[in-house]
Image (tube, rainbow, N blue to C red):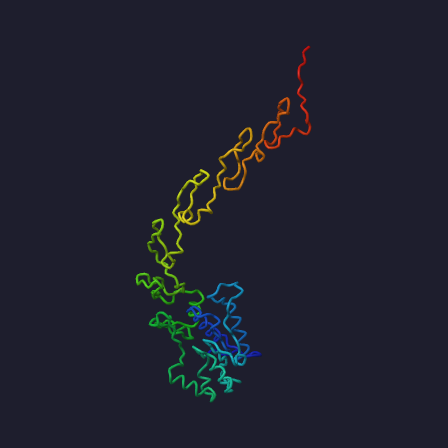
């Protein structure tokens, strides 16, 4: 690229930072975990800029707000001596008319930068300026011989390598066929747009050809479980239903509703699975149909499944109070069946009797 650097206390290059993050987020959208990616910047100013842009972009692979969220490792080249990662993107930062690459002319820094990756290494910078320096001349010439240096970067879906897009730095080339600019790539990975329009076609663990994933490859989706509906018959009850292919037979529970009579005499509706395997957990929530053993045989008002007694001393039904001995009734007053008590104001019967000589 030829994005110019911005010189402050430390060099930074916003255009290059956008390219670096677009590539990193493309890796994430392709299923690479954030902590498998490292971005190395030549200058602290570029590290700070890339970190800020990364936070603002809200990376898409992990829900925001989670405390254990993994992050792309963004460091300076000097800080990363002795460390390595699967994928390393190097932001060279410097790009100016004076062709000044600063301390990057030191071989040690180049050696550290080029030796940190285990699987993939990507240099992003102004190659026209760097290959003029003897420190970088050999590696840039070698990479050009191997056709690894270009103003565009071919990217493809890891499942459909035949569908290739070339990422370039300038927007005016977008009109050309199969070419997209760096900002468009950033749009793809940020919105999870379906830039790969091929059918996913992944073969699930069931290995059934007709069950291959029929979704578009992007937006990325969970392709670890076969969601195709298949018919299923329960072994014991012989009821038939449909289940998702990935669900194990032993995890299926028959949900057919059956109504049966409980030991208490009440009818209860529950799933077939409950009647077969969880009968002890089926509770009757009807009102108990038995009566207390009191003189009046009052109906029990407890919930049927709850442990309770029908002895006369448990009956709390409201009854009229009769004074013992005379059996006169207290008007407009009721007491509990199991513990009849006279009114506090009238502990003794005050009923007047007619006396005849």
- Which residue is the extreme one toward the bottom? 134
Residue 258 horizontal/vertical position (percent):
39, 44
Q: Residue at x 44, y 73 (%)?
A: 23
**Is 79 placed left or right of 208 in the picture?**
right
Tell which of 11 and 252 is nearer to you: 252
Residue 239 horizontal/vertical position (percent):
35, 49
Residue 32 horizontal/vertical position (percent):
44, 70
Tell which of 290 and 72 is nearer to you: 290
Tell which of 68 and 318 is nearer to you: 318
**Is 65 placed left or right of 152 in the picture?**
right
- Which residue is the extreme one toward the top? 357
Q: Residue at x 40, y 86 (%)?
A: 142
Q: Residue at x 53, y 85 (%)?
A: 103
| Quarter of the image where the C terminus is located | top right
Q: Residue at x 50, y 39 (%)?
A: 304
Residue 303 horizontal/vertical position (percent):
51, 40
| Snapshot quadrant of residue 245 | bottom left
**Is 337 placed left or right of 95 in the picture?**
right
| Quarter of the image where the N terminus is located | bottom left
Above or below, comparing residue 180 to residue 96 in the picture: above
Above or below, comparing residue 149 to residue 32 in the picture: below
| Labels in figure, total | 0
């Amino acid at each position: 690229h030829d994005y110019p650097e911005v010189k402050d206390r430390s060099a930074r290059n916003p255009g290059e930072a956008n390219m670096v993050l677009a590539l990193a987020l493309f890796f994430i959208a392709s299923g690479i975990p954030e902590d498998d990616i490292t971005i190395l910047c030549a200058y602290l100013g570029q590290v700070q800029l890339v970190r800020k842009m990364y936070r603002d972009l809200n990376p898409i692979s992990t829900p925001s707000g989670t405390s254990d969220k993994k992050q792309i490792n963004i460091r300076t080249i000097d800080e990363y001596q002795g460390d390595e990662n699967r994928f390393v993107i190097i932001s060279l930062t410097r790009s100016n008319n004076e062709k000044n690459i600063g301390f990057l002319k030191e071989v040690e820094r180049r050696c550290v930068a080029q030796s940190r990756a285990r699987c993939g290494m990507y240099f992003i910078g102004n190659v026209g300026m760097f290959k003029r320096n003897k420190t970088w001349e050999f590696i840039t010439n070698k990479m050009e011989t191997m056709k690894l240096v270009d103003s565009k970067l071919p990217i493809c879906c890891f499942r459909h390598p035949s569908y290739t897009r070339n990422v370039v730095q300038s927007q005016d080339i977008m009109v050309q066929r199969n070419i997209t600019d760096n900002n468009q790539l950033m749009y793809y990975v940020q919105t999870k747009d379906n830039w790969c329009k091929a059918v996913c076609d992944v073969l699930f663990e069931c290995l059934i050809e007709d069950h291959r994933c029929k979704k578009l490859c992007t937006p990325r989706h969970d392709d670890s479980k076969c969601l195709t509906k298949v018919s299923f018959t329960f072994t014991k009850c012989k009821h038939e239903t449909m289940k998702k292919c990935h669900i194990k037979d032993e995890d299926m529970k028959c949900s057919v509703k059956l109504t049966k009579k409980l030991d208490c005499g009440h009818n209860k509706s529950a799933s077939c699975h409950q009647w077969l395997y969880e009968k002890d957990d089926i509770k009757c929530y009807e009102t108990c149909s038995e009566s207390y053993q009191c003189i009046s045989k009052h109906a029990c008002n407890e919930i049927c499944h709850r442990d309770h007694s029908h002895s006369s001393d448990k009956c709390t039904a409201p009854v009229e109070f009769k004074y013992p001995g005379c059996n006169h009734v207290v008007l407009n007053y009721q007491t509990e069946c199991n513990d009849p008590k006279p009114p506090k104001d009238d502990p003794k019967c005050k009923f007047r009797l007619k006396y005849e000589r």
